[in-house]
């Protein structure tokens, strides 16, 4: 069984202490590829470097970082450097043969640079802005990932893609994980975050179909809306089920695989 595991930035920084040992145990029964986030770290370091960050919202309600060339460089430095290597070190310490990569390495993730973005301003009006260095994922180097996995490595991928002009492109980590899962034909996409799953009010939604997830995207707020979109995309690419679960609980990977206290999305 192949599982694509996405670790949100909060999980990378504050995961339950059992995460690595749990992942080590689960890796005896499944092959894992990890994609990680870390946007808060990017924002904090960018601001320390005197580069304030700005965010935009699409007409579909998706919030994303506006990435100009300078931001793309900082994003790459933090994601591929500090965040990725700290995570790889942690996994290695726990006995996993983790190998730190980004979408740039071996052209693991190729993307098309968006020329324009349609955004919604504070008054609710749509307008077009220059696309910056944000990418729309077009391919994943499946063969390279399979080769590494067959050799016993756990690929740990930072969400920076290679553009057609060989530029660095910011791609959303949840959606990068979805594309990796789809390319590998993974049985499961697991998104570990800082909450138990999709919450409506105070109630956890335990199961839903992809069509229901589409309708719910504008109800769940920033952050979760991209996770729902990633789950929908993964299912459309043949992944059997997508799970949104907490990485802050004991043995989070095992519990997500067992569908314990989480949100499970499928086409069934």
Image (cartoon, rainbow, N blue to C red):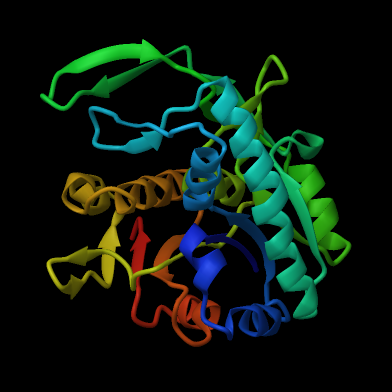
Residue 18, above or below 181: below
Residue 268, above or below 123: below
The quarter holding residue 242 reads bottom left
Do we see residue 233 in this rendering? yes
Q: Furthest residue to the right?
A: 151
Residue 7, above or below 65: below
Taking 232 as reference, is 8 left or right? right
Q: Nearer the viewer, residue 147 or 244?
A: 244
Q: Residue at x 55, y 45 (%)?
A: 45
Q: Nearer the viewer, residue 226 or 267?
A: 226
The C terminus, quarter of image = bottom left
Taking 181 as reference, is 245 left or right? left
Q: Residue at x 89, y 62 (%)?
A: 151
Measured from the top left, where is residue 106 in percent x and y?
81, 37
Total labels: the figure holds 0
The N terminus, quarter of image = bottom right
Measured from the top left, where is residue 200 in percent x and y?
16, 64
Do we see residue 172 in this rendering? no
Q: Residue at x 38, y 36 (%)?
A: 64
Q: Nearer the viewer, residue 76 or 8?
A: 76
Measured from the top left, where is residue 165 in percent x and y?
69, 14
The quarter holding residue 34 reads bottom right
The quarter holding residue 142 reads top right
Residue 49, above or below 200: above
Q: Residue at x 28, y 22 (%)?
A: 119
């Amino acid at each position: 069984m192949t599982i694509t595991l996405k670790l949100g930035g909060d999980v990378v920084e504050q995961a339950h202490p059992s995460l690595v040992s749990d992942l080590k145990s689960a890796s005896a029964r499944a092959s894992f590829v990890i994609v990680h986030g870390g946007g808060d770290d990017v924002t904090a370091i960018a601001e320390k470097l005197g580069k304030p960050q700005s965010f935009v919202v699409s007409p579909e309600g998706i919030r994303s970082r506006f990435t100009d060339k300078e931001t793309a460089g900082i994003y790459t430095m933090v994601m591929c450097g500090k965040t990725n290597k700290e995570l790889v070190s942690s996994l290695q310490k726990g006995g996993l043969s983790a190998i730190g990569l980004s979408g740039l390495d071996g052209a693991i993730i190729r993307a098309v640079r968006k020329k324009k973005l349609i955004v919604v301003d504070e008054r609710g009006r749509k307008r077009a802005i220059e696309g910056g260095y944000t990418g729309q994922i077009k391919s994943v180097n499946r063969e390279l990932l399979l080769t590494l996995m067959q050799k016993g490595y756990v690929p740990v991928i930072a969400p920076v893609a290679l553009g057609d002009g060989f530029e660095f492109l910011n791609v959303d980590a949840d959606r990068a994980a979805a594309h990796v899962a789809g390319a590998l034909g993974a049985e499961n996409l697991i998104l570990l975050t800082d909450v138990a799953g999709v919450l409506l009010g105070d109630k956890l939604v335990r199961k839903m179909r992809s069509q229901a997830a589409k309708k719910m995207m504008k109800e769940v707020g920033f952050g979760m809306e991209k996770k729902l979109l990633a789950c929908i995309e993964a299912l459309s690419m043949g992944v059997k089920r997508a799970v949104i679960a907490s990485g802050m609980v004991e043995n989070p990977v095992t519990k997500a695989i067992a569908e314990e206290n989480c949100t499970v999305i499928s086409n069934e």
